[in-house]
Amino acid sequence: MGIFETLVLAILQGITEFLPISSSAHLILPSQILGWDDQGLAFDVAVHFGTLIAVVWYFRSEISRMIVGWLSTGFSAQPNEDARLSWMIAIATVPAVLVGLVFNDLIEMHLRTVEVIAATTIGFGILLGLADRFKPFRSGLAEMTIILALIIGVAQALALIPGTSRSGITMSAALLVGFGRLDAARFSFYLSVPLILAATGLKTFELLQVSDSVDWEWLGIGMAVSGVSAWLGIHYFLALVDRIGMLPFVIYRLLLGGALFFFFV
């Protein structure tokens, strides 16, 4: 890839990883629509690692508290609030991991198409809009339970379908079970850490099995650009979501899905 393609794809990955508009859709579409070469496994690893660094750094205080809480009271009869939240994140991660292990090859072969992306972009965009109209009745993430975590986790598993948006579907589920926008967004971002870590580890293992040469300079640029854009995406989304709501993202998804159906399906 050239510098232009590298920068565009890295920025797309970084920004869309945490916005409710689907990073996988935006990374697939350039090759489907513009005829760009597939970015390759090594680039996928680099940009995902960049977004992982961004979310861990942004929530470093919260993550540190959860780790300390889990190590100190995680296995006790009365875990503290940070330990409970870390357990809820772990529980909510399980469905996506299991579904990914069983259906990943099937999804890769049959669902990475413009038709699927267009349908899921519109369908789950509408769901996000409907979920955002529900009034929250929970005071905060301290009210997260195993059942609620599993509901959000099962929703997260649907994000393996391209165009769904991991952050979009988990925020939708969290809103539907009564959490406010900021709590829904924060739990979605916390959930991204183990999942991106697992995906990056799996892709790294796959990368080690191939003998293709790796352009480390381009990968470093891609990782840095995706990390910075991801940090900015998280920061401004959290700063604005309570004021603007999900409607701008719903409209964007409807327009994008409609354009895909009109021009490419």
Image (cartoon, rainbow, N blue to C red):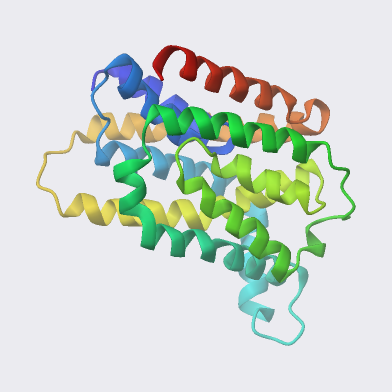
Q: Is residue 167 visible?
A: yes
Left or right, 104 with reference to 218: right
**Closest to the observer: 217 or 164?**
164
Residue 243 percent across, percent down from the top left: 82, 28
**Closest to the observer: 50 or 37?**
37
Residue 181 percent across, percent down from the top left: 78, 41
Name the image quarter holding residue 217.
top left
Query: How many numbered markers are drawn?
Result: 0
Q: Going by the picture, which residue comes out furthest to the top?
A: 263
Image quadrant in which the N terminus is located: top left
Give the residue at x 70% y 86%: 76
Give the residue at x 29% y 36%: 43
Left or right, 86 with reference to 97: right
Image quadrant in which the C terminus is located: top left
**Closest to the observer: 94 or 204?**
94
Left or right, 179 with reference to 265: right
